[in-house]
Amino acid sequence: MFRKIAFGLLVIATVFLALVTIASFTNFNDWWIRLWDYPRLAIFTIAGLLFLVSGFTLRGKRRWVIAGTLLAVTLWQGYRIHRYTVIAKPEVQFIEAGAQVPADQCFSVLSLNVLQHNRQYGRTLDLIRRYDPDMVLLLETDQGWVEALKPVSTRYPHVRNVPIDNTYGLVFMTRLPTDELTVHRLIENDIPSIFARLRTPAGRRFGYIGLHPRPPQVGTDTQERDAEIAVGARIAAKAGLPVLAMGDFNDVAWSDTSELFKRVGTYLDPRIGRGFYATFPASLPAFRWPLDQIYFTEEFSIDRLEVLGKVGSDHLPIIAQMCLAPAVGERVNEEPEAIEGEDLKEANEIIEKGIRTEAREEVTGSTDGEREKRNREE
């Protein structure tokens, strides 16, 4: 009896793992399909373990069918995530010792989804005090968070508070020289994003994008999320400046949408060949995935990248030490992935599908200057 029950559970698990893997092959953006982009590591691990179990315990045709299916699932999921392991070649090398990059070309950045209902304010304030980053992006900030952050926000001459109680508020703070700092509603009017033109202490100009699109949710699709990510890629492509992009993308680094974002924006990903740098969910270390992203164009180099400890949120903070020294970046970084022939067309189609009527003019019909002027919040 026990063997029959165990075999039945193995069959059910195999069919389930095969179906969710096949679903992730498709281009459909329904929430229950795109949801399976996230736990690829967990699916890879479970399928691999069950493959070993079936290979050692089953006999005859059953073994070949079940073990073969599980092996196919394991190989495919491993292929999708392998670039975020040490077996892949790093796309970005850390600045080598003795590179002598001037300190005034470097700065530190911190990104954290604080979890709106997390009221352990002191842990986040202590985090900011301890690391003292030059630039901070905090997401899911409501008015309570804005008030609680005042003891540290006074350290920064440039602050933009957008308190919203829908879990999409944000706070952006920087001590870097700032030429422009604007809040945009790219796709949905209740979801803000940050766009800035900043300068390193040495005066080199660069663009910054902070995003927090809506995640896949029951009963909805991912059109708006994918469109907002695609807009971020297109802005980088047109910026004419080095660009740094950070935030909670509510998407994993290995998804088709993130890979398109990376190609269209000519971004590099410092996690490739180095590790997942997984940030969510904070309470489940064995099942975390990289939901909080950091990308930059090839002019940047990186001296440090670290996921920090828990601060009461369901996300973990991510911090990086960046340098904008193009000669160094050219030496230590790989070339960005080439834009494929259909990439720009696909990005534009994603934007058109995801955009809402009230935002259509802002994204598709306006010049950058006109759009920034309308979206500027004083």
Image (tube, rainbow, N blue to C red):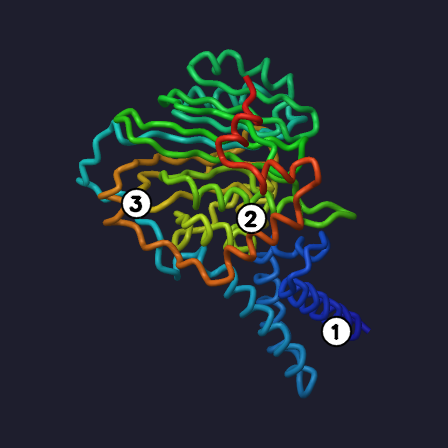
Quadrant in which residue 145 is drawn: top right
Query: Which residue is denoted by mark 2 in the rendering?
Result: 289
Point 33% across, 31% down: residue: 205
Discs 1/3, front: 3
Of the two numbered discs 1 and 2 on the same chain, state the one appearing first in sequence. Answer: 1
Place of residue 116 in the rendered image (x, y in percent of width and height, measured from the top left): 65, 27
Nearer to the camera, 135 or 112: 135
Q: Is residue 213 left or right of residue 179?
A: right
In the image, taking residue 63 as reference, residue 236 lies left or right, namely left
Question: In x, y percent, where is residue 283?
Answer: 61, 39
Q: Residue at x 57, y 47 (%)?
A: 288
Provide residue 92's location: percent of width, then percent of height: 34, 49
**Label 3 belongs to which residue?**
94
Q: Residue furthest right?
A: 1
Element carrying mark 2: loop
Q: Is residue 228 above or below residue 114?
A: below
Spatial CA distance of label 3 from label 2 is 22 Å
